[in-house]
Image (cartoon, grey):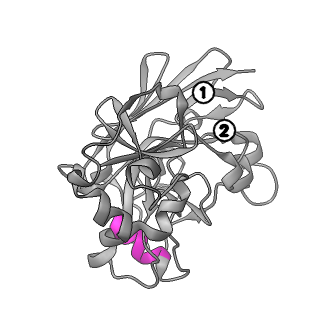
Amino acid sequence: MRIAALSDRAVIVDGSVAIDIETASRGRFGPAIAGLYPDWDEFIDWASDPAAWADAERTEFDLRQLGAPSPSPRQVFAIGLNYQEHATEAGLKGAMPDLVIPPTFTKFAASLTGPYGELRLPSSRVDWEVELVVVVGRYCDRVDAGAAWAYVAGLTVGQDFSERDIQRLGPVPQFSMAKSFPGFGPTGPWLVTPDELEDRDDLELECVVNGEIRQKSRTSAMIVSVSDLIAQLSAICPLYPGDVIFSGTPSGVGMGRNPELYLKPGDEVVSRIRGIGELRQLCVA
C-alpha cells in the first residue's frame, strides 16, 4: 500500500489516482496524514481490506502536489557512516566495527519538505546524500531486532542535503545545523508499507545529478540494518508513531571527491529507490 500527503490531505495512492482517506472512511480517519500514525494499527486494519474503499472516488493528481509522508515527526534520527565505502571516502581507514550505537544526529523537522520542488542553495558547498527513510508506526521502546519490522509504518525516499562549511565549523562537527536548512530534508513521494516490497532489506538506491549517476548502492550493504537501527535507537529512547529515521547514505558524495564537487544553481537532483519512487529538486541561488 502507498499512502501520501496530497495537498495536505491523507490519501491512498492506487496507481495514478488518489483516494481521499477521510472521505472514503466516512470521517473515521484524516484529513491529515500525521493523524494516521497514532492510530496506525486501526488504520491498517481498515485500509488492508480493499472492499472498505472500493467504491471511493478516485482522483488524478500532479506529483508536485505531494508533501512529506511524515511532515511533523516528534523526532528525526539521521545515521552517519552506515555504508563501508562511504566511511572510507569520509577518511575512516579499515573496516567499520560492529556498532553498539551508530553515529546519530538529527535533521531538525523544519528542514523536511515534499518530494518535488526547488532547493535554495545557501552557499556553494551543498552536497547530496540519498537515503532510505524509515517511518515509525507504533510506539517502540527497547524492541529486539527480530521484532523491529513490526514497528515500521513504511519506507520512503530521502535526501540528506548537507552544507559542508557549516558541518566543519567549530571544534566539533555541526552535523545537525549543516543538514537543517529549509528544504534540506525532502522525503517521498509516498510511504510504501513493507509488505509491498519483494525484499525490504535489499533495495537499490541512487542519486543522479543532471543525468549523471553520483551514488548507487543497495540497502543490503548497510552496516547497521533497519531492524538493528530500530533496536539500537529504541534501547536508548522511545520511538513514537510518525518518527523519521534517515538510515545513512552510500559512497559518491561530493565531499568525498578529489577535487570536491558541490551543487550549483540550475542542477537537478534526482534521488530514487527502486520499488518506492523518486524525489526531484531543482537547485536555485
- Residue displayed at 63% across by 14% down: 266
Q: Pointers 1 and 2 in contact (CB under 8 A)? A: yes
Res 97 visible: no
Query: What residue sits right under mark 1 in the picture?
Result: 117
The C terminus sits in image quarter = top right
Q: Provide residue 144's location: percent of width, then percent of height.
A: 34, 82
Q: Quadrant of residue 213?
A: top left
Res 32 visible: yes
Q: Earlier in the sequence, mark 1 or mark 2?
A: 1
In the picture, measured across the screen, residue 226 lies left or right of residue 201, that is right
Observer-nearest residue: 54 or 252?
54
The local secondary structure at tag 2 comes to: loop
**Magenta: predominant secondary structure element?**
helix
Observer-nearest residue: 58 or 191?
58
Query: What residue sits right under mark 2 in the picture?
Result: 183
Q: Which portion, as a residue range, is magenta?
A: 225-233
User: What is the spatial separation of the Cα atoms under label 1 and label 2, in whole angstroms?
Assistant: 9 Å
In the picture, measured across the screen, residue 185 lies left or right of residue 215, that is right
Residue, far left: 198
Q: Provide residue 28's location: percent of width, then percent of height.
A: 44, 62
In the image, is residue 192 above or below residue 127?
below
| Amino acid type of the residue tagged 1 in the rendering | Gly
Q: Provide residue 4's location: percent of width, then percent of height.
A: 45, 44
| Amino acid type of the residue tagged 2 in the rendering | Gly
In the picture, measured across the screen, residue 145 lies left or right of residue 165, that is left
- Residue displayed at 59% across by 51% down: 71
Q: Please give the label number shown on residue 41.
A: none
